Image (cartoon, rainbow, N blue to C red):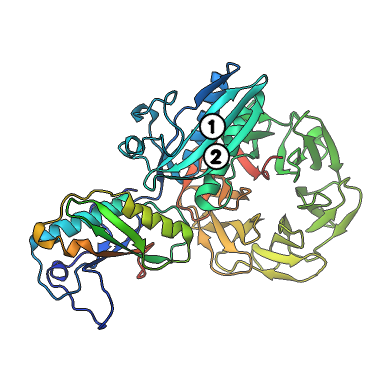
Amino acid sequence: MGGAAGGGGGGGGGGDGEVRGIEFVRYYEQMMSRIRENWVYVGEDQNLAVTVRFSIQGDGRVVNVRRSDSSGNPLFDQSVESAVRGVRDLGPPPAQYARDFSDVEVTFRAKDLAQ
Amino acid sequence: MRRRVVSLPLFAAFLAIAPMLAGVAFAQVRGEIVGPGATRIPIAVPDLKPLGGFERAADAREFVRVLRTDLELSGLFRVVDPAAYIEDPSQMGLTLESINFDNWASIGAKGLVAGSYSGTASGITVEVRFFDIAEHSSSGGRRLSGDSQTVGRLGHRMADAVLEYVTGVPGPFDSKIAYVANREGRFREVYVMTLDGKTTRATRHDSITMAPSWHPSTRSILFTSFKGGRGPALYSVDVGNGFDSRIASKLGVNVGGMWSPDGSRILLAREEDGNTDIYELDPGGQQSRRLTSHWGIDSDPSWSPDGSRVTFCSSRGGSPQVYVMRMGSPDAQRVTFEGEYNCAPAWSPDGKWIAYAGQRGGAFQIFVIPAEGGRATQLTTSGTNEDPTWAPDSRYLAFAGRRGGKRKIFMIDRTGRWEHPLTDGPSDDSSPNWSRRLE
């Protein structure tokens, strides 16, 4: 029932054309894994997706969590917001990538659309 | 839950992709998560805080036991082991300002159902609130009172309220399931169980009883009995005092009695002139009206929740299949098209679904299909399973399943992802029928 670390994660990267190193990847994977482990969705509707945007402060605290859109299902929307808010502290991001992780956007899908 | 793991191509993280659309404020870091990490909410349910009044500690413990049992049984929650709780229920705060959310978060709980009780002259009053630990918020609660004899029902009603808080629909736990079993000897009698496992015997016919079906008031159960060796007859038993009465006793096959949603009529399958058809009876069983007249065998009738339509099993197409018929119309529409044998249809209380047992590979499995027709979903995959019945919330079903030994009553959710046995022991348990919510 519980998710394996990194299982189900996909995508990744950013938006300014920079090349990032292994420390970026390690922190990114840890962030995605922690959020996914924290995501509990008990609804039946599986054809849902919603995007959440947030900031990770220099000390690792997750702040300014807000949805970029809505899935149309309040139970699903609430589950993803709680997943991000519940993480609270991810540990300090690598200093050279602190600015990157100050603006993060994660899209949550209830199921793989390819299935 | 089956999930396809999407691997993260390493280069995708190394090489950031330039925004495709100029002027759009893209986040610095983006990602995608497919499928939740868990499909059960870890929830803490501490003992109630005593506020005084009459000594009712045993009632309070029973309330919490039933509440925890129901929440686990729902498949939506995993109750965190109370031994891990840091907070002392007798001392803890119960307001947003006084609750130590970090203490609950540290033991892995995401939800908290906590409250207090006061002992009254005849029982207890409980007041419970629901808290979201991640959000540090509370958006619901319930105050209930009852006597010591019905404290279990208070637990069920609180569990139903917790499910409503989470899903938007009240849970099914303040209800009962009637079923047939040979628990006390060779005879098959009707029994009634609550969802926390308490079972009482409803009939003493010393015979074969079959097909129990609740009256919408939940005060009596319709059933078929071979009492007296005179062939099957339709009876009704009052679950309050145990008295029963014979309703219809025509010779021949006379089974499948089911009350209409308003309690004014009864549907049953009856054999007359060598053929079995669906009949409608008045509550006393005196006047009957034949609803189907086809050479095929028509059986297992079930009302739509508004009483305007009937679903039933018929062999009129060459093999037993599920059909739907509007009351007063001679035409029936076939609903199932996959498989050679689909029977025992049951219409969901919300009107959206029909559950049935379908034969696949030599065994019967439970299926759900949209009532207006469409693609069927197979809920069970192991053993052989029969006689589906809907919970009052249309989220869960019960059925009789054989998994190697004797048949047992199981509970399953409408997606088939969560299944749990409701009965155990050496008896053969069958024909479950789930009541409406108790009055």
The chain identifier of the residue carrying mark 1 reads B
Query: Which quadrant does the N terminus of chain B fall into?
Result: bottom left
On screen, residue A65 versus residue A89, left or right, reads right
Please give the name of the residue rendered at 36% of the width and 35% of the height, measured from the top-left corner.
B100
Residue type indicated by callout 2: Ala
Residue for point 37% across, 57% down: A80
Q: Quadrant of the C terminus of chain B?
A: top right
Look at mark 1 in the image and give the residue it sits on: B66
Q: Is residue A72 above or below residue A37?
A: below
* Marker disc for residue B218: none
Q: Secondary structure at mark 2?
A: helix
- Residue B436 image point, x, y percent: 68, 45
Within 10 Å of disc 2 (Cα), the crowding (few <14, some 14-19, many 20+) is many
Q: Nearer the viewer, residue B5 or B377?
A: B5
**Residue A56 falls left or right of residue B383:** left
Chain assignment, label 2:
B
Q: Which residue is mark 2?
A: B159
Q: Residue at x 40, y 35 (%)?
A: B99
Respond whether the residues carrying marks 2 and 1 are from the same subunit: yes
What amino acid type should be assigned to the residue bearing mark 1?
Answer: Val
Q: To which quarter of the image does residue B179 belong?
A: top right
User: Marks 2 and 1, how far apart in space?
Assistant: 8 Å
Q: Residue at x 10, y 67 (%)?
A: A20
Check whether the beta carbons of the residues at disc 2 and disc 1 lie within 8 A of each other.
yes
Local crowd size for mark 1, using a 10 Å CA cut-off: few (<14), some (14–19), many (≥20): many
Q: Residue furthest right?
A: B286
Q: Is residue B425 visible?
A: no
